Image (spheres, grey):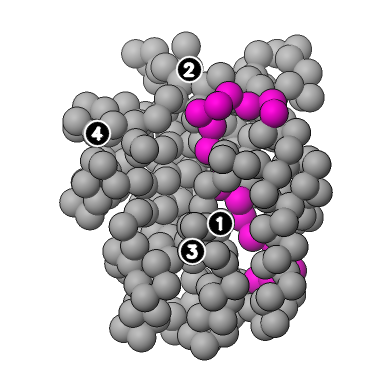
Amino acid sequence: MPMLVGTSGWQYADWRGVLYPHGLPQRVWLERYGECFDTVENNNAFYRLPTREIFESWRDRTPPTLVMAVKASRYLTHVKRLKEPEEPVRRLLGAAAGLGSKLGPILVQLPPTLQAEPERLAACLRCFPAEVRVAVEPRHASWWTEDVRELLTRCGAALCWTDRLGRPLTPLWRTARWGYVRFHEGMAHPPPSYGDQALRSWLQRVCATWDDDQDVFVYFNNDSGGAAVRDAARFADFARAAGRTVSRTPALSRDGSLM
């Protein structure tokens, strides 16, 4: 599998005229997205877990090559705060199984107020079967310890690398054979876009950590104004120019707009 580059979600009204032609009904936006990208990070599941039937409909409406990462429900991460994870994880996996072979990693994003609870995280990770990839995005500095790094490595879970304003928000630990990177907000114009230097710097970090035959999932969450779409396409172009194998992304014109 190549480096998979996409966006965090696809249902954004201000992507009209960027990814979605004016007049294209919202009910077929996912189909249009699937014509341009081979991967997407599904944020819907975080706010309200869809039914298995909805996941099945997403499976049926997308190309065979599409891989969908799924953000774990906030009930597990923000309400339960990883306590008693068995039932929430079982319910999440039961629904997401509707994606079949298109299911990608599960993203477990922790609340910024949740201080390090390694035992609680370990219990949560044990609920996932070995064949399900899990990326963890802690957001409190107390998690940055060798014990946590060893825990993630032992469980085969990827530390989610994250960026805001061109700076890493996490240690650049490699804790799995595969990687997961999220871009939240860049500093370029128009905001929240990323500039070339920031994208190239992140590409160098990724290339120095994972070989071309190792999977890396890269998602842009700076959705405002279509910045995520353009930045994902640019990042992918830089990666191809560096000799990396990259999933399908939209073509860009010389002025940086989508073709």
Disc 3 marks a residue whose amino acid type is Ala
The reply to whether residue 228 is in sight is no
> Where does residue 185 sit, x and y in percent of width and height?
48, 49
3 and 4 marks in contact (CB < 8 Å): no
Q: Secondary structure at mark 2?
A: loop
Gap between marks 3 and 4 measured at Cα:
28 Å
- Between disc 3 and disc 2, the foreground one is 3
Question: Could you classify mark 1 by the number of other residues whose Cα lies within 10 Å: few (under 14), some (14-19), or many (20 or more)?
Answer: many
Gap between marks 1 and 2 measured at Cα:
29 Å
Q: Which residue is mark 2?
A: 258
3 and 1 marks in contact (CB < 8 Å): no
Residue 212 vertical position relative to residue 60 in the rendered view, above or below: below
**Residue shown at the point (80%, 42%) measured from the top left:** 53
Disc 1 marks a residue whose amino acid type is Ile
Q: Which residue is mark 3?
A: 130
Q: Which residue is mark 4?
A: 244
